[in-house]
Amino acid sequence: MSAALIVREAGPQLTLQDMGRPGWIAYGLSRGGAMDRLALAEGAALLGQPLGTALEMGGLGGAFEATEAMRVALTGAPMRASIDGTPVEWHAAHLLPAGAVLEIGPVTAGAWGYLSLGGGFDEPEVLGAQSAHLTANLGARIVAGARLAVGPDRGGETGRRIRAEDRFSGGTLRVVESLQTHLFPEEQRARFGQEGFTRDQRANRMGVKVVPDGAGYGVEGGLSVVSEVISPGDIQITGDGAPFVLMAECQTTGGYPRLATVIPADLPRVAQAPAGAKLGFRFVTLEEALEAEAARRRALKELPRRVEALVRDPADVPDLLSHKLVSGFSSGEHHDH
């Protein structure tokens, strides 16, 4: 029987997510995929394998048992985690022994955590991806009792960590003008780039609402616009005047006016902003946006070079002799006291 990860407990927003389904927008299906794609790339770098699928955990993780020894990587929003009761570090790769239980609690910062496995998940694909697209009823949330197939692992080191880019507490987001920015009064366009915003409690895989410190936004005369193609990062202004940043499972067309668009490089910061986080927006030119995208792609290629060994005092490992090897490397797990 092939290796599997058994879900003993499941948080309320537990799904399999990969890079989504490009190429279906003409059929009314947005790409979907992970809310924080950088976290997927960090997990792949920690495990030394190609970008694949991870368990996405919104707010709270769960408890997971390994049927065979397997490598795991924890990325995205930091969460309290332990293996058989021993705390383990986040943004790191660890060995999960056969029969051991990995417990993942609530987030301590950010919003979305990720669990990647050596060998990846070996679940069926639908329309070319394993990811659940809940809005389109493709796939479903994972619940307790699920048994997730795990692919063959070519092996590699555990006891590795990566110094993740801090994107878990809000901050300033770079935006470019949309096709409808000019419909908004000049005063609103200027104010949008100057005032502060607070991430609302209302947020899901479709979008994130942000509340302005001042008055709401809206086009002159309440003008509606022709429904046209939209994409993640677009900032719609709905009836209450609060901006709504569209995310992974956004609709493919819409008639709400769009004030601006968050550039792809800053979307992980939107996704990971917890409720109550302070956000700001700054208009940049298209040239600056393209430069930021080129820098983002370079940074992704450099991720494997940022992986480093976890250092743990052997005296702090009471079961040192029981740590088995995976392709010649020991687990090297680490935790802080």
Image (spheres, rainbow, N blue to C red):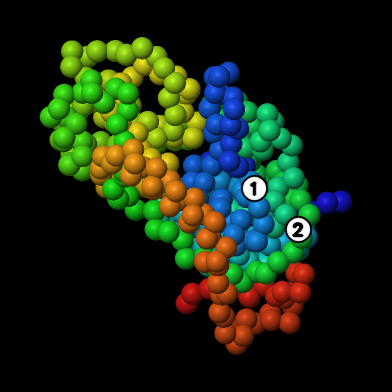
Residue at (57% x, 80% y) in the render? 312
Measured Cα–Cα span from mark 1 to mark 2: 13 Å
Disc 1 or 2, which lies upstream in sequence?
1
**Marking on residue 149:** none
In the displayed structure, does residue 149 sit left or right of residue 86?
Answer: right
Residue at (57% x, 85% y) in the render? 313
Kindly state the secondary structure of the residue where label 1 is placed. Answer: loop
Judged from this view, the residue extending furthest toward the front is: 287
Q: How many labels does the image show?
A: 2
Crowd around label 2: few <14 · some 14–19 · many ≥20 (10 Å): some
> Residue 47 location in percent, x, y?
64, 61
Judged from this view, the residue extending furthest toward the left is: 187
Identify which residue, 191 or 238, lies in the foreground.
191
Judged from this view, the residue extending furthest toward the right is: 1
Identify which residue, 107 or 245, lies in the foreground.
245
In the displayed structure, does residue 107 sit left or right of residue 98?
Answer: left
Judged from this view, the residue extending furthest toward the bottom is: 315
Residue at (48% x, 22% y) in the render? 252
**Marking on residue 153:** 2
> Residue 144 location in percent, x, y?
65, 44
Amino acid carrying label 1: it is: Gly
Identify which residue, 274 or 297, lies in the foreground.
297
> Residue 201 location in percent, x, y?
34, 38
Kindly state the secondary structure of the residue where label 2 is placed. Answer: loop
Residue 255 seen by the camera: yes
Read off the residue under disc 1.
52
Amino acid carrying label 2: it is: Asp
> Residue 132 location in percent, x, y?
61, 35
Pointer 1 and pointer 2: residues touching (CB < 8 Å)? no
Residue at (23% x, 20% y) in the render? 183
Occupied quadrant, residue 196: top left
49 is higher (above) or lower (below) than 284: below
